[in-house]
């Protein structure tokens, strides 16, 4: 998976598996950084490129392949949700969003993250009021 904030400011969690031949589109073994900024993703195997929303931008030499349309391929997006600074990812399409989730762990997480946010905001307020 790769987590990307797109040009549209939307956070997406995309598959890193190139739909061409299954190469990792961001392998650190090839010197790619594990984090940072990118304008697009480029598969190092045959140089298919992908926009930050997963759409295929380019597929060299594939214009010669009968029936190929780059709009039919891309990096799949996993269902994700950003909540209070956390990014939740699921492969299940039938569970409720985090804000509506009523499981014990979700309630616990909501309570603890609220406490963390309150204490961090309180700390920020103190730092501002003292001018530090
Ligand atoms: S495996 Fe990615 S471009 Fe071929």
Image (tube, rainbow, N blue to C red):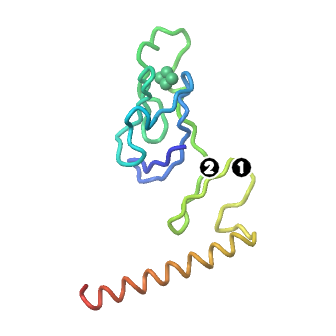
Q: CA distance from mark 1 to mark 2?
A: 7 Å
> In the figure, 97 relative to 78: above or below?
below
Give percent across and percent down for residue 77. Answer: 57, 42
Q: Earlier in the sequence, mark 1 or mark 2?
A: 2
Secondary element under disc 2, as helix, strand or loop, is strand
Number of numbered callouts drawn = 2
Residue at image mark 1: 93
* Ligand 1 closer than 8 Å to label 1 CB: no
Q: Is residue 52 left or right of residue 84?
A: left
Q: Is residue 100 left or right of residue 14?
A: right
Instruction: Determine the residue positioned at 54% across, 47% down.
Output: 13
Label 2 C-beta lies within 8 Å of the nearest ligand 1 atom: no
Residue positioned most to the left: 131
Q: Would you say the residues marked 1 and 2 are in contact, meaning their CB atoms lie under 8 Å apart?
A: yes
Q: Mark 2, residues whose alpha carbon is within 10 Å: few (<14), some, or many (≥20)?
A: some
Q: Residue 9: x percent and y percent? A: 41, 53
Residue 86 spot, x, y in % from top left: 54, 63
Picture residue at 41% right of the left edge, 50% below the top: 8
- In the picture, the quarter occupied by the N terminus is top right
From this viewpoint, is residue 70 visible? no
The quadrant of the image that shows the C terminus is bottom left
From the viewer's perspective, is residue 10 above or below residue 47? below
**Residue at point 62%, 79% (across, down):** 111
Q: Mark 2 highlights which residue?
A: 79
Label 1 packing within 10 angstroms: few (<14), some (14-19), many (20+)? few
Q: Is residue 24 visible?
A: yes
Is 118 rendered above or below residue 8?
below
Q: Residue furthest front?
A: 29
Nearer to me, 47 or 79: 47
Residue drawn at x 54%, y 42% is 14
Mark 1: which secondary structure?
A: loop
User: Could you say which is closer to the camera, residue 68 or residue 87?
Assistant: 87
């Amino acid at each position: 998976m790769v987590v990307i904030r797109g040009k549209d400011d939307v956070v997406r969690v995309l598959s890193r598996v190139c739909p061409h031949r299954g190469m990792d589109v961001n392998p650190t073994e090839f010197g790619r950084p594990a984090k940072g900024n990118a304008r697009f993703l480029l598969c190092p195997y045959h140089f298919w490129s992908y926009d930050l929303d997963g759409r295929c931008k380019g597929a060299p030499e594939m214009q010669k392949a009968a029936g190929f349309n780059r709009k039919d391929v891309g990096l799949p997006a996993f269902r994700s949700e950003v909540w209070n600074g956390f990014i939740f990812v699921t492969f299940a399409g039938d569970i409720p969003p985090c804000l509506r989730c009523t499981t014990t762990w979700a309630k616990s997480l909501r309570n603890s993250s609220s406490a963390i946010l309150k204490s961090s905001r309180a700390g920020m307020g103190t730092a501002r009021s003292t001018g530090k």
